[in-house]
Image (cartoon, rainbow, N blue to C red):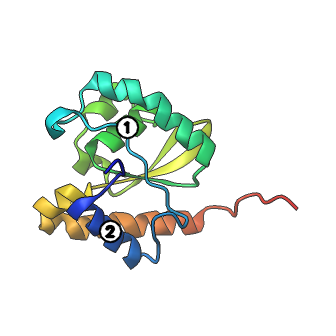
């Protein structure tokens, strides 16, 4: 469909957002690391991720988010390797389970941002027992967001 998070995974994501009082397009912007799906829905290779990363970083610079929730291994590893406090090779190989459950800091698109890592909705459909951990990550994201200073507004 040319849109991120469609199908059953997208429906689950929409329910997760609704449970937090959020919705797509209203204080929520969804972007993918890879801008087109690899053939046969295979995992993206490092060269494809590297090719798409500048586009993602430009999106971040233009949107100026206050917080990023990285859903899934490729999003987490890419964002934390690009600008996180972990060495890039460490971030690219660290299991998602070791990255989630904490607030990371990353320099992305010219901004210093908190990054919360959680499971991809498609993974949660395959592993429903992990939904409680994902919910804890989303609660951490809300707590982190609520603790951020108010954005600067023009008079």
- Residue 127: percent from the left, percent from the top? 12, 61
Residue ID at (49%, 56%): 29
Q: Residue furthest front?
A: 1
Can residue 87 be seen in the rendering of this structure? no
Circle 2: is it few (<14), some (14-19), or many (20+) Cα within 10 Å? some
Of tags 1 and 2, the one toward the viewer is: 1
Q: How many marks?
A: 2
- Reading the image, the residue beneath label 1 is 35
Does residue 51 lie above or below 4 as drawn?
Answer: above
Does residue 72 lie above or below 40 as drawn?
Answer: below
Can residue 116 be seen in the rendering of this structure? yes
- Residue 1: percent from the left, percent from the top? 31, 51
Residue 111: image quadrant is top right
- Reading the image, the residue beneath label 2 is 136
Q: Earlier in the sequence, mark 1 or mark 2?
A: 1
Q: What secondary structure is marked by label 1?
A: loop
Q: What secondary structure is marked by label 2?
A: helix
Q: Nearer the viewer, residue 67 or 88?
A: 67
Residue ID at (28%, 49%): 72
């Amino acid at each position: 469909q040319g849109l991120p998070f469609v199908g059953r995974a997208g429906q689950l994501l929409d329910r997760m957002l609704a449970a937090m009082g959020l919705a797509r397009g209203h204080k929520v912007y969804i972007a993918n690391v890879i801008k087109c799906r690899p053939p046969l829905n295979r995992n993206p290779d490092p060269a494809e991720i590297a090719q798409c990363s500048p586009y993602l970083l430009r999106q971040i610079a233009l949107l100026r988010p206050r917080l990023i929730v990285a859903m899934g291994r490729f999003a987490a590893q890419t964002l934390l390797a690009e600008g996180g406090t972990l060495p890039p090779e460490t971030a690219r190989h660290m299991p998602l389970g070791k990255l989630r459950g904490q607030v990371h800091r990353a320099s992305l698109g010219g901004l210093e941002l908190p990054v919360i890592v959680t499971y991809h909705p498609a993974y949660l459909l395959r592993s429903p027992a992990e939904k409680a951990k994902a919910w804890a990550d989303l609660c951490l994201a809300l707590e982190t967001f609520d603790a951020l200073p108010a954005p600067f507004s023009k008079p």
